[in-house]
Amino acid sequence: MSHEYVPEIATDRDGNEHEVQGWQDDFYGGKLGFWLFMLTEVMMFGGMFLSLAYYNTLHPHDFLEASASLNRWLGGTNTVILLVSALTMGLGLLRMRTGDVKGAKLMIWATILLALIFLGIKAVEWNAEYHHGIFLMHDQMLPESSMAFGKKLFFGMYFTMTGLHGFHIMIGIGLMLWLIKRINSEKVTQDHHILYWNIALYWDIVHLIWVFVFPYFYMIGAGDVVAGGGHHGH
Amino acid sequence: MSKTYFDETHCAFGHPKSTFMQWMLTIDHKRIGLMYAAVMFTFFFVAVATAFVMRLELLAPGQQFIDGDTFNQAFTLHGVIMIFLFIIPGIPAIFGNIVMPIMIGAKDVSFPRLNWFTFWLYIVGALVALSSLVSFNDVDGEMIFNFADTGWTFYAPYSLNTGTNVITTLVAAFILGMASILTGLNFLVTIHRLRAPGMGFFKMPLFVWGIYATGWIQLLATPVVGITLVLAILEKQFGIGIFDPAKGGDPVLFQHLFWIYSHPAVYLMILPAFGIMSEIIPVFSRKEIFGYRTIALSSASIAGIGYLVWGHHLFTSGMADIAKTVFSFLTFFVAIPTGIKFYDWVATMYQGKIVLSTPMIWALGTIITFAIGGLTGITITMVGLDIHLQDTYYSVAHFHYAILGGVVFLMFAGMHYWFPLITGKMYNEKKAKIAFYMNFVGINLLWFPMFIAGYLGMPRRYFDYLPEFEIYHQISFAGAVVMVSGLVYMFWVLFQGWRNGEPSGTNPWNATTLEWHLPSSPPPLENHSKVPYVDFEPYKYENGEPVVKFDYETMKRID
Amino acid sequence: MDIKTINYEEEKKVYYKVLIGLLILTTITFIQPHIYTANTFASQMFIAVIKAWLILMYYMHLKGEKLIGAMVIFALFLVSFFFIIIIGIDVPNFQFGDESYIMSAPHTTK
């Protein structure tokens, strides 16, 4: 498919020519559109953080205890993994913009690998929580259990938010695989890389969400406020 | 005869030969707008029929022919269809698509293939909503009518506990919300990127300002209800706890999250409608609009302030008293920019040469009905009054005057105004005016008594009532009959106009904005022959005549 | 937008500098509960905001983007407003706490 789009020229009454911006070949428009889409993600996760803060305000002590019971080291490892993956994604885009297609693809594969490791660690965490009786519709999270409301709500939002975040990571992996396909068929090139740009932005926002999810769930209970103090890793 | 957008089209992929596939795959904003109109008006009439069934049931106290549970499903169905399938896509999906790009001198929207995808996403949402009407009995596979009975507001905890098809409806609403977001996104980028050279923001027609402000609401408010619906689904299906009091969940949180979207949603409905009013008034007063800049900025203010007032839906929910005070205070502010618009429209008409064509009488009628709707809204902004009037017919009459008498009436005004642009024909003026009067009399007969009934204590969403309220329901029913007749007649007149009407020419109203400066009527596929250079304001009239004139082949000014 | 003239070495340096910054901030995240115990929640959120700012400005190239930057600020302002009203004003003044089931013992300890 050749993008041989030639922009129209409009002439004003003094004879000056002005190039008309068409909908085709509009890099800035593509960037603007994707940023607007990401603002919707901000509003969605903002709504979830709002719900979390709502119950945190009603049950501050239970939230701290529940937070302390999460495995900070696994969570922290995932933080570093996602951080590095943001770097690899950015470096890949940079290579594509300088024409290094092979290097770009290598970076995308590296990002995918890191994303998969992230998901793997998440699965390990959820599995551990399950075996402690904490999982949706299971044992401690049923209405009849004696676990305090604050903790039930903490874990309800924990599974919801880490679950939806993980879902967005899976979508990201899918997008990256598709990107590699488009690069291979030369639809994405050094001169036409808006898709790559936007997928990199998408990956950055997935990382950004984790930047707030991690401390709110894993770190708030890390202080000495918790009775008995210290870490109860699983 | 030159080709119009009905003769040729661009497709999302492939080059189909059949007319049917060309419509299925078209990325042309004008065809997409028409398809939205066809589907949306079909749903509109289903919802009107549902309302009529309710009016029939409510004609007398006691059960007439449907029981209480079915009645609950009826008002839920009426609300879900009207809100999610009709009024929220509403004017943007139809006129935003068809007219806005032409008004800014563009050939299409910024993302035409996304526009095509968005239309079909809307259809998927509609199909999922349809599927939520029925369930299949576990025992013998029999099909039963199992539509949600929660009201379109889906309040927890009832929505969590009811056995009706809530989850499917929530999924449908989520998909429809995505379509709304993508439409808003598309329009925002279009307005930023594709305005003709020379057309700064303050040279855009006011309808485009309306669509722009609406786009910001579609984009930022809808995701909040999106996540609320997802959380409600997760609550009902996986018991995450946040809305379920049995696990410490607070139903007031659901109300907060729900109304953070649903209040801005009403501004999403009215802002494009106000844009249509701002287009019609100058044309039929033969005069420049008064206060262009203030009307433009008031659209932006309404969108902005509208985000801050949702709590006035929670005055009786158990929200903290101080929060109620804050919300009441903020809500009074949002009325001010609307008031400014009304004053500007009246000032435009002052000393103008008023032409009472059908679009104008719809606009003038709306000034009356929306004023009633808006002002009664102010009365219930006062917390003390709202404690008494919340969940009575007073609120219902308020929002029907505002939505039906504001948004829908202006949508009809726009239909009559842009009818010649879209179809190339003209409808029968006399019959169209009769249809207006039927609708105008109908809406007032139907809804005005309800203010009184509500004030006297008639609760909403009740299928039975005390005998003292019967007279109001009887008058309302008469109004419903007149209104439904008026609606059917109006559509018939327009349909006949399309089939047998006289050719209208490219500028039958002698208006100034760019959609009336096309080389053919209906428009060609890519709109203007050439993109014009815009160095003029949108509503320039002198002695009742447009100032700016174009050669339609070169789009150069010849005035 | 002319992005053909890019300085590969310059931009790569920026990416790595931001990476180091983010790693340092992550380390501080883990040390903070031990060295500054006054308000863990506020400290953690503060560190997160700095991280977010670095990511937005440099990884997401928001630095220098006036229009998009203004749009991001608007969206963030809206979310902040929701927090200020609901978390700042409504929930702390929950006036039915004594009679409310969701705040009743033994389901809630404080």
Image: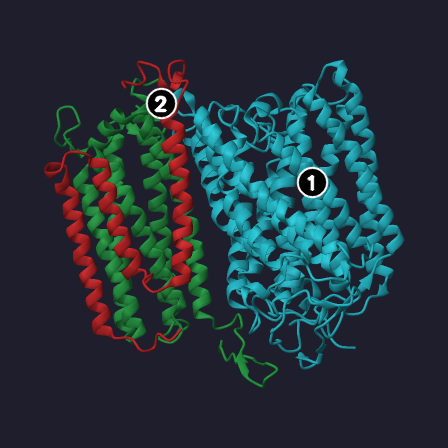
Q: Is residue B38 visible?
A: no
The colour scheme of the drawn protein is by chain
Q: Nearer the viewer, residue A99 or B189?
A: B189
Q: Is B131 positioned to the left or the right of B251 in the image?
A: right
Q: Position of residue A202 (x, y in %)?
A: 36, 56
The residue at the far bottom in this view is A15
Would you say A156 lies left or right of B97 here?
left
Q: Which residue is mark 2?
A: A142
Residue B371 is tagged as 1
> In the image, which is nearer the foreground, mark 2 or mark 1?
1
Chain red in the figure, letter: C
Q: Residue at x 57, y 72 (%)?
A: B196
- Report x, y in % for residue B331: 54, 36
Whether residue C25 can be seen here: yes
SS class, disc 2: loop
Please report the residue visible at 34 percent of the width from the left and 29 percent of the height from the top.
Answer: A55
Residue at 38% over, 37% down: C84
Q: Nearer the viewer, residue B179 or B251?
A: B251
Left or right of B55? Residue A14 is left
Q: Chain of mark 1?
A: B
Q: Residues within 10 Å of mark 2 (few under 14, many from 20)?
A: some
Chain colored cyan: B
Q: Quadrant of residue C42?
A: top left
> Which chain is green in the rendering?
A
Outermost residue toward the left?
C35
Front-most of residues C89 and B177: C89
What subunit carries mark 2?
A
What kind of element bears circle 1? Answer: helix
Give x and y (percent) for residue B76. Answer: 63, 31
Quarter of the rendering occupied by the C terminus of chain A: top left
Whether residue B275 is situated above or below residue B468 in the rendered picture: below
